[in-house]
Amino acid sequence: MNDIEITILFALFSYLINYMNYFEYNPYPIFLFINLTGIYYIFKKIHIDINIGIRYGD
């Protein structure tokens, strides 16, 4: 990612946190969901890489 894209993502993230704080909403379930989906996709990619390695002998 370019630096400008990372900066835009941080800006959107901080705006979302501020918005949730304004309505006194607890953001931790959303963070937990984002982390769990990220871990799922990482393990899914590792699983695909292991299968390709076994299949093609890498």
Image: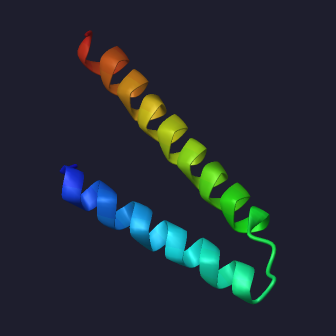
Query: Percent from the top left, x then y, of residue 14?
Result: 52, 68
Residue 43 at x, y percent in the picture: 53, 36
Q: Is residue 47 left or right of residue 33?
A: left
* 22 over 39 or under it: above or below: below
Q: Is residue 17 above or below residue 23?
A: above
Taking the image as shown, residue 48 lies to the left or right of residue 22, namely: left
Q: Residue at x 31, y 25 (%)?
A: 52
Q: Is residue 37 above or below residue 51?
A: below
Picture quadrant of residue 28: bottom right
Considering every residue shown, the one lying at the far bottom of the view is: 23
User: Who is closer to the viewer here, 9 or 44?
Assistant: 9
Q: Residue furthest top?
A: 57
Specify the quadrant of the image occupied by residue 17. Answer: bottom right
Compared to residue 42, the image places residue 26 above or below, namely: below
Q: Which color scheme does this rendered protein use?
A: rainbow
User: 45 or 1: which is nearer to us?
Assistant: 1
Residue 41 in picture, x, y percent from top left: 50, 46
Q: Residue at x 31, y 59 (%)?
A: 7
Q: Quadrant of the C terminus?
A: top left
Residue 45 relative to residue 4: left or right: right
Left or right: residue 31 versus residue 44 is right
Q: How many marks?
A: 0
Which residue occupies 77% across, 65% down? 29
Residue 8 pos. (x, y %): 32, 66
Q: Residue 24 versus residue 28: which sits nearer the camera?
A: 24
**Residue at left 42%, top 61%?**
10
